[in-house]
Image (cartoon, coloured by chain):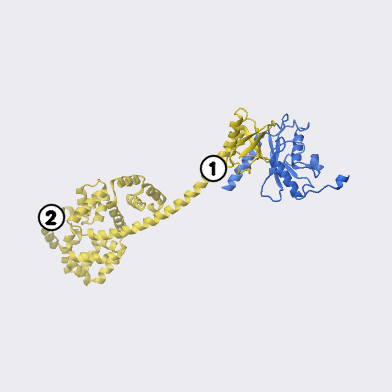
Chain colours: A blue, B yellow
């Protein structure tokens, strides 16, 4: 009780800088990694994350890319999380790839102490959960096709 | 710089790379360090700060810094390798596309230059040709020999000396008319002049004098002989004399030249005065009527006939055997000789540019 009363509230920017430094140092086993989308973004809102599918599941050998958006109210409120690659999971919207807070307990019961790394680690654990480890996954070819389409569009715009 | 590479199995190793290295180069580096069996570069996926790095980008593009770390894993099969190749093909498309717009502007200025150059050359040719024609109208002796040689050169060996001489005689030693005869054949009316040329000069004069009524219908074989007969006719009827000039082919050629370049009139009259003072006196006495004759519009077909030889004459002087072959090849493409020679000279004797010029302006030539 006494320690709770004396806790210090860390400002948003300091918190995000801590997470950025941790992401760059690569502490951990390397199966999850994350970094800022744009190094010049002074508000540090847009982030990119990667989860390598855990072995022993249908996700093995896959790399899932995600987008995390930390609004001005982060870390008081959780970030928005959305899969960029196609994935079939119980807590992920099939169309948009967004992680549904009401289906993902960490986002629903958000605590200030949680970090983006924690979110990624928890999503990886969710991939290993009994209801998700054997779900049929969309073919990986779609992933390549989508990437190619993006590249093609970009090149057309450039031309 | 040094990079730490982590693997999914929990191990890590270091590699030495440069910020300007491409991701593909880094993958080959990893393959060299760890062995082809463990991490074949075609199957490697490199991850940095949550991003899967693409093969064609560089480390600096992905903001990989000193003491950074990468995660390496293997993809299933060769799918990514194929995608990489496909990306490379896409990457090669933009340069090709970009180069096309570059070539288009280059063509336009060339075309404009060709047109301007052609105009300049045409003007120069007209000027040079007109002065040359003034002198060559009175071709005799060594000048006649030079003209015959030039016409033979123009034909590239297809016209022998006798043919050229015959055409010159039929055209009253007028070179541009002779060229027309060489191209399209000597007209029947002019053929009559051939046997007349064999008459002795005195006999020709007597014949002309004896039959005054036949004078307009019998062309002379030499400009020197024209003027005495004109004098006789002039003595008879002054207006008739000028009318006779109107029907004279040589006068028509003179009129065509004077209308295209009025400055030539005075030198021509001076030359005329040297050859036939009486005719010059007659012209001076009827100055107004002479000017009226000079200013009458040239008949369309005759204008065309004279314009084309005029353009051909100076070109013959400049053509060398190699250039003659090039002109022959351009003619084989289906263009007429005059257009080919004009384009060839306008493009500074460059066969390819001339062909390009002819093709771009084919509509103009046909019109």
Q: Which residue is mark 1?
A: B93
Vertical placement of residue A17 versus A135, above or below: below
Residue at 70% over, 41% down: A23
Which sits in the foreground, A39 or B165? A39
For label 2, the SS is loop
Left or right: B275 in relation to A152: left
| x, y percent for residue B289 | 26, 70
Marker disc for residue A13:
none
Please give the chain letter of the residue carrying mark 1. Answer: B
Q: In this rendering, does residue B214 appear at all?
A: no
Identity of the residue furthest to the right in this view: A1
Q: Which residue is mark 2?
A: B199
Q: In this rendering, does residue B143 appear at all?
A: yes
| Label total for image | 2
Vertical placement of residue B78 versus B258, above or below: above
Q: Residues within 10 Å of mark 1 (few under 14, many from 20)?
A: few
| x, y percent for residue B212 | 15, 63
Which sits in the foreground, B325 or B358? B325
Vertical placement of residue A14 versus B301, above or below: above
For label 1, the SS is helix
Which sits in the foreground, B346 or A41? A41
Please give the chain letter of the residue carrying mark 2. Answer: B
First in sequence: mark 2 vs mark 1? 1
Quadrant of the rendered structure where residue A95 is? top right
């Amino acid at each position: 009780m006494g320690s709770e009363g004396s806790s210090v509230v860390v400002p948003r920017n300091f918190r995000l800088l801590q997470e950025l430094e941790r992401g760059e140092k690569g502490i951990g086993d390397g199966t999850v990694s994350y970094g800022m989308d744009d190094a010049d973004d002074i508000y540090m809102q847009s982030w990119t994350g990667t989860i390598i599918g855990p072995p022993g599941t249908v996700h093995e050998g896959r790399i899932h890319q995600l987008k995390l958006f930390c609004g001005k109210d982060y870390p008081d409120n959780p970030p928005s999380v959305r899969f960029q690659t196609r994935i079939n999971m119980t807590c992920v919207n099939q169309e948009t790839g967004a992680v549904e807070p009401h289906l993902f307990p960490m986002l629903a019961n958000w605590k200030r102490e949680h970090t983006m790394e924690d979110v990624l680690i928890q999503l990886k654990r969710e991939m290993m959960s009994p209801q998700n480890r054997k779900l049929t996954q969309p073919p990986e070819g779609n992933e390549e096709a989508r990437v190619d389409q993006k590249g093609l569009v970009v090149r057309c715009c450039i031309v | 710089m040094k990079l730490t590479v982590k693997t999914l199995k929990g191990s890590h190793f270091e590699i030495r790379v440069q910020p300007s290295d491409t991701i593909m180069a880094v993958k080959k580096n990893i393959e060299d360090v760890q062995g082809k069996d463990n991490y074949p570069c075609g199957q490697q996926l490199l991850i940095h700060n949550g991003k899967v790095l693409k093969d064609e980008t560089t480390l600096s593009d992905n903001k990989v810094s000193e003491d950074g770390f990468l995660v390496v894993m293997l993809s299933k099969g060769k799918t990514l390798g194929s995608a990489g190749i496909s990306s490379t093909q896409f990457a090669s498309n933009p340069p090709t596309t970009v180069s096309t717009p570059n070539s288009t502007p280059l063509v336009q200025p060339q075309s404009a230059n060709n047109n301007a150059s052609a105009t300049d050359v045409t003007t120069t040719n007209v000027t040079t040709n007109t002065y040359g024609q003034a002198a060559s109208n009175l071709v005799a002796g060594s000048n006649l020999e030079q003209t015959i040689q030039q016409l033979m050169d123009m034909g590239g060996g297809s016209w022998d000396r006798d043919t050229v001489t015959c055409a010159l005689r039929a055209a009253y030693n007028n070179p541009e008319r002779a060229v027309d005869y060489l191209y399209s054949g000597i007209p029947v009316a002019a053929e009559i002049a051939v046997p007349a040329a064999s008459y002795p000069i005195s006999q020709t004069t007597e014949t002309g004098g004896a039959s005054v009524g036949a004078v307009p219908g019998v062309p002379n074989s030499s400009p020197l002989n024209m003027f005495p007969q004109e004098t006789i006719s002039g003595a008879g009827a002054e207006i008739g004399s000028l009318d006779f000039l109107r029907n004279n082919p040589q006068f028509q050629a003179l009129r065509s030249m004077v209308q295209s370049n009025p400055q030539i009139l005075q030198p021509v009259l001076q030359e005329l005065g040297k050859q036939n003072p009486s005719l010059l006196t007659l012209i001076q006495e009827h100055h107004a009527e002479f000017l009226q004759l000079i200013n009458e519009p040239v008949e369309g077909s005759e204008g065309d006939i004279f314009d084309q030889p005029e353009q051909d004459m100076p070109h013959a002087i400049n053509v060398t055997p190699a250039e003659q072959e090039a002109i022959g090849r351009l003619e084989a493409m289906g263009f007429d000789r005059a257009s080919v020679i004009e384009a060839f000279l306008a493009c500074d004797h460059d066969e390819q540019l001339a062909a390009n010029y002819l093709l771009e302006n084919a509509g103009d030539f046909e019109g």
